[in-house]
Image: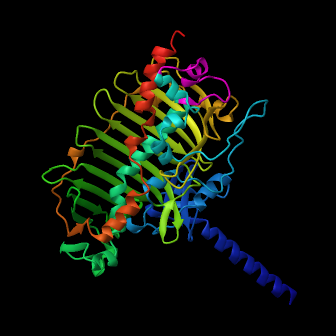
């Protein structure tokens, strides 16, 4: 009897071992493989879960049990294949600056006599724009006194940024905030139309007559399926003709098919074109894809109609948020923006955001009448998007734009951003060398042109969208209420500050 029981136990043990071994290897499709750059490695979708993986040969992979814990955690956080099925469920690009509520942060300053840490509640980016940089980055009265021509010696020293702890952060803190605010604001502003596209395909909007079908047939005879991935091999092209008080547009969305996504290893993908009446090429273009593991990858081009061209790229992993998908604030995200207005006015930035609520920003800024400014900063932030973005502290340096340049840190202290001589972020500035870093070796330039794309695209479904309807006006409040005009975030060039710079030359230089 004992031998029989022993034999059964051995047999059971063998079966378990065989099952576990089989679960560790699998033949994976492109839509079940995700490559990561940070942490570097490969994830595979094995038996309903993402795990660190290693390629054996061909399309056969095995679970990499010896992978670093950081890679295992990163893989486990990927969304499941098939989670991204429609534009209506995708994340808002303005949420790329959403803070991770679980982040613990770092100690801001070293201890020392007379040294303080962050205190009070910093203003949001929107509040800085509304209130003016001169009352946020300088002590009360400094900018007004310098601009008015009657500053004290202390105010003269404070205006351009004294190196003493507690002095005004001045242009150092202003540029640190502006570089991120302008870049992210421009990217979010360009994404406003996509917010409308996510919001209008509902039965309520259709029943109210705000959207009507001109030609073609809605998938499944249901408008909520409008931007779902089409089955088969052909993409679905949707044309939306907008009408209302604002300028009429012809908007095209080309929704990639299931077979196209499978071949590319994507969960979902689409292209977007916005065309003005009578134009042969669009004024806006965007390409978006959601990778196998849920990485949101967007590339956009747009024109200001006055010769300026702007391009942006956003990469961020998504996570589940109820029925929708949101930016995963625990993961690293990047945003690149380039704007070229003319030969004298251009700007580019590269922003990286980590799960510890830190933003690293590289900026190359060409402004008429000034030498190009190359800058680097690292800052700590909070917020759920562009509108309520707050900066607590950070460090900044630039190459001087022909002058001595700025190098140091600032913290928000009660009512303004003050110089912080012992802030721990100062040491992080050594991460970047302007002379060797590839970002700074070339002037801002937008690659690609809008003339590559056509406004004469055959559409399978054509809709009319009444932007003046109550339903669309409600959507407008939702889509535009929490955004800022990227150009308004150029607050370090305000009239008040320009007057103060003129006043500084006449009242402070040589005093």
Dividing the picture into quadrants, the one containing residue 432 is top right
Name the side, left or right, on which 164 lies relative to 194.
Answer: right
Is residue 160 shown in magenta? yes
Query: Would you say residue 44 is visible in this rendering?
Result: yes
Q: Position of residue 171 (x, y in %)?
A: 52, 29
The residue sitting at the bottom extreme is: 1
Tell me how many marks there are: 0
Q: Position of residue 343 (x, y in %)?
A: 28, 27
Q: Is residue 225 above or below residue 132?
A: below
Toward the viewer: 38 or 359? Answer: 359
Prevailing SS of the magenta stretch: loop
Name the side, left or right, on which 193 lies relative to 248.
Answer: right
Q: Is residue 343 above or below residue 319?
A: above
Toward the viewer: 511 or 121? Answer: 511
The residue sitting at the right extreme is: 2
Q: Position of residue 267 (x, y in %)?
A: 42, 64
The residue sitting at the top extreme is: 510
Dividing the picture into quadrants, the one containing residue 291 is bottom left
Toward the viewer: 303 or 112? Answer: 112
> In percent of the image, x 15 and y 50: which residue is there?
279
Name the side, left or right, on which 402 lies relative to 194.
Answer: right
Quadrant in which the N terminus is drawn: bottom right
Chain part drawn in magenta: 149-170
Q: Position of residue 450 (x, y in %)?
A: 24, 45
Is residue 449 shown in magenta? no
Quadrant in which the C terminus is drawn: top right
Q: Is residue 366 above or below residue 99?
A: above
> In percent of the image, x 42 and y 26: which residue is there?
498
> In percent of the image, x 52 and y 71: which residue is there?
322
Query: Would you say residue 67 is visible in this rendering?
Result: no
């Amino acid at each position: 009897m004992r031998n029989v029981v022993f034999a059964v136990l051995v047999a059971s043990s063998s079966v378990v071992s065989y099952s576990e071994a089989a679960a560790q290897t699998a033949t994976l499709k492109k839509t079940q493989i995700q490559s990561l750059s940070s942490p570097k490695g490969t994830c595979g979708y094995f038996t309903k879960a993402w795990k660190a993986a290693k390629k054996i040969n061909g399309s056969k992979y095995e679970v990499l049990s010896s992978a670093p814990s950081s890679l295992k955690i990163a893989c486990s956080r990927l969304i499941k294949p098939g989670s991204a099925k429609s534009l209506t469920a995708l994340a808002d690009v303005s949420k790329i600056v959403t803070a991770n509520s679980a982040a613990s942060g770092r100690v801001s300053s070293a201890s020392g006599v007379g040294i303080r840490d962050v205190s009070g509640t910093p203003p949001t980016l929107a509040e800085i724009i509304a209130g003016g940089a001169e009352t946020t980055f300088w002590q009360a009265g400094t900018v007004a006194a310098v601009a008015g021509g009657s500053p004290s010696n202390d105010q003269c020293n404070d205006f351009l940024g004294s190196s003493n702890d507690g002095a005004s952060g001045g242009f150092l803190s202003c540029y640190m905030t502006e570089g991120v605010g302008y870049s992210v604001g421009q990217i979010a502003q360009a994404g406003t139309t996509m917010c409308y596209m996510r919001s209008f395909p509902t039965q309520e909007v259709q029943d109210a007559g705000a959207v009507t079908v001109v030609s073609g047939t809605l998938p499944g005879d249901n408008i909520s399926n409008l931007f779902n991935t089409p089955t088969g091999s052909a993409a679905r092209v949707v044309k939306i003709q907008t009408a209302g008080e604002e300028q009429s547009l012809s908007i095209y969305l080309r929704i990639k098919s299931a077979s196209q996504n499978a071949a590319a290893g994507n969960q979902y993908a689409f292209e977007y074109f916005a065309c003005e009446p009578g134009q042969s090429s669009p004024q806006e273009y965007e390409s978006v894809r959601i990778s196998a593991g849920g990485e949101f990858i967007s590339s956009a081009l747009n024109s200001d109609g006055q010769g300026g061209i702007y391009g942006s790229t956003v990469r961020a992993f998504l996570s589940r948020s109820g029925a929708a998908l949101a930016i995963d604030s625990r993961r690293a995200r990047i945003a690149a923006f380039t704007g070229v207005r003319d030969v004298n006015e251009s700007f580019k930035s590269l922003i990286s955001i980590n799960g510890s609520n830190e933003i690293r920003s590289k900026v190359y800024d060409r402004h008429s009448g000034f030498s190009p400014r190359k800058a680097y900063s690292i800052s700590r932030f909070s917020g759920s998007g562009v509108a309520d973005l707050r900066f607590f502290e950070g460090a900044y340096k630039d190459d001087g734009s022909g002058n001595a340049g700025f190098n140091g840190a600032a913290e928000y202290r009660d009512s303004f951003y003050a110089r912080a001589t012992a802030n721990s972020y100062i040491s992080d500035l050594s991460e970047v060398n302007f002379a060797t870093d590839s970002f700074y070796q070339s002037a801002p330039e937008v690659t690609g042109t809008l003339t590559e794309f056509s406004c004469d695209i055959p559409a399978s479904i054509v809709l009319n969208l009444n932007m003046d309807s109550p339903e669309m006006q409600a959507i407008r409040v939702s889509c535009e209420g929490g955004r800022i005009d990227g150009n308004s975030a150029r607050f370090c060039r305000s009239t008040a500050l320009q007057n103060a710079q003129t006043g500084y030359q006449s009242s402070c230089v040589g005093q």
